[in-house]
Image (cartoon, rainbow, N blue to C red):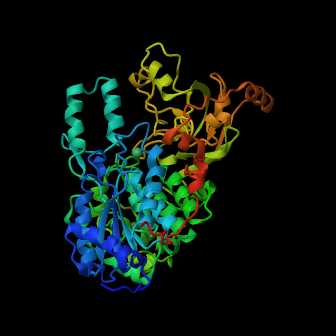
Amino acid sequence: MSAETNGLRSRAWFGATGRSGMTHRSWMRNQGFGPEVFDGRPVIGIATTWSELAPCNAHLHRVAEAVKRGVWQAGGFPLEFPAMALGETMLRPTAMFYRNLLAMEAEELMRANPLDGTVLLSGCDKTTPGLLMAAASVDLPSIMVTGGPMLNGKYRGQDVGSGTHVWKFEEDLKTGKMTQEECYFAEGCMARSNGHCMTMGTASTMACVAEALGMQLPGSATWPAVDARRYEIAQEAGRRIVTMVHEDLRPSQIMTREAFENAIRANAAIGGSTNAIVHLLALAGRLGVKLELDDFDALARPVPTLVNLMPSGKYLMEDFCYAGGLPVVLRQLSEAGLLNNEQVTVTGRAIAENNSGAECFNDDVIHSMEEPFQPAGTGTAVLRGNLAPNGAVIKQSAVSPHLLKHEGRALVFDSPEDYHAVSDDPDMDVTESDILVIRYAGPKGYPGMPEVSNVPLPTKLLKAGVTDMVRICDGRMSGTAYGTVVLHVSPEAAVGGPLALVQTGDRITLDVPSRSITLDVSDEELERRRAAWQAPEQKYDSGYAWLYTTHVTQAHEGVDFDFLRGSRGHKVPRESH
Ligand code: FES
Ligand code: MG
């Protein structure tokens, strides 16, 4: 034990003499740690979002054990601590409602504790951005280890993808192609190991985004949760974080504007989730990196989709991993001049150098630039128009080609529940050329901007063989879903966005190639409607829901809290005793 500070913030706790140091060390020793752990080695916090209520993250305590091995090996002192586990499939009104709370909780824990560096263990959709946002606002050396995807789902000899097949099975149930008994069996076949969704949903997307941002080790995004290599790479991350502390390599040096550009292009190449947009906007806000919604369209346009994964394609994450994983994609982007090659990553090396040797083992899973899975310009598009003055997004690869340009009659619903109440009615007044408008599902309106935008088609039309319709919503869509769905309409209806002024019977024109979404109603008429519009009553006057609805920002701003933007650093707080 030594009393000198050696530049590590943990020394303010464990290096102190007298009553203060005694208090900090003595209580830690009740866990059986000997006095040698306080000798000035880096203290590494392992933030784990493990919980049995977050099934995608339920194995992270085992991943943490592997990280700890690595930290010990490299001469650090690992200490695991829980951070709010957000289970996408459980939390109501939506896990997104709590992403900022996780980010706020983890940020405060990282700063308040005697930590010199952190390892971020995440998996399910919101846990990855939540922890990255926290790490960005604290700016201590940090490395991410995502928990890895589930093994491919297998049902009746076929691959089934988490999320993606939920929508398919629901349609089959509604049209009588599947019985409820078969469905019970299939749901067990879909999720058959630890891990997060194994489609290119939001969890897999954010794992790849974290790797493309340079925040997790090369190849780390794709190893299945139950693969031995997942634990090997977790151990390697544990070793690496100790060196990162000595190098003082911090998130603000890794997650630069260049890194965000890399992540956006990687997201386009993997056919990633639209949710990456809101998360990256929020994360950039924490780092003071200037990033706007339009950057996503502009940066993605020259990038073809290379990865053939559900929901846009046919394979799953296990296949992506065995084909070579994200390093193959990053190498190809680099060779095509679409990567900021020199951007430093958690390895301490540049991103292009990390991935230069990546080999592709299956070119039907990871296509080449010359023969891409989908051509450049077909990724997620940003739309504007009088219906979405601050933008909206649409995932082109999930769109039916015949609906890319479409004009139709609006059928307006003030909540998903209002729609569901009539959607099974065989006499519902609806045709396949109508446009379903679902509103008051934005950040403030729902609240939490849930994944409700891709409402199932009216049963009457499903039975008639209709497979897609245009839907417009101020909410989000699961990364595992598909369909012609205009998402993230901003401003949302609940704050008086033009979406609130649409009436059933209005004509709406969607024109994806020209990036527009237009409500064919005159400005004068819209003004008249605006004057008559009444804002929804503020439902909450206390608690987290009040904080959320008072401070949440709009979709094009990342849906972070206004007061959490920026970094607040890692200065050691005042003594507690
Ligand atoms: Fe957790 Fe999909 S529900 S990753
Ligand atoms: Mg989701």
Identity of the residue drawn at 22% across and 32% down: 184
Outermost residue toward the top?
Answer: 427
Identity of the residue drawn at 48% across and 60% down: 133
**Residue 105 appearing in the image:** yes
Location of residue 370 in the rendering, given as x and y in whole percent from the top left corner: 45, 65
Number of marks in the image?
0
335 horizontally vs 233: left or right: right
In the rendered view, tell whether residue 233 sits above or below residue 405.
below
Q: Nearer the viewer, residue 371 or 89?
A: 89
Q: Quadrant of the N terminus?
A: bottom left
Q: Quadrant of the C terminus?
A: bottom left
In the rendered view, tell whether residue 16 sits above or below residue 276.
below
In the rendered view, tell whether residue 417 sits above or below residue 540.
above
233 horizontally vs 468: left or right: left
Identity of the residue drawn at 24% across and 79% down: 35
Q: Quadrant of ligand 2?
A: top left
Location of residue 492 in the rendering, given as x and y in whole percent from the top left corner: 61, 38
Q: Nearer the viewer, residue 378 or 63?
A: 63
Where residue 526 sits, quadrant-wise, is top right
Outermost residue toward the front?
Answer: 19
Location of residue 244 in the rendering, given as x and y in whole percent from the top left corner: 40, 79
**Residue 358 appearing in the image:** no
Where residue 271 sits, quadrant-wise, is bottom left
Q: Nearer the viewer, residue 24 or 418?
A: 24
Location of residue 416 in the rendering, given as x and y in whole percent from the top left corner: 49, 28
Identity of the residue drawn at 56% across and 56% down: 564
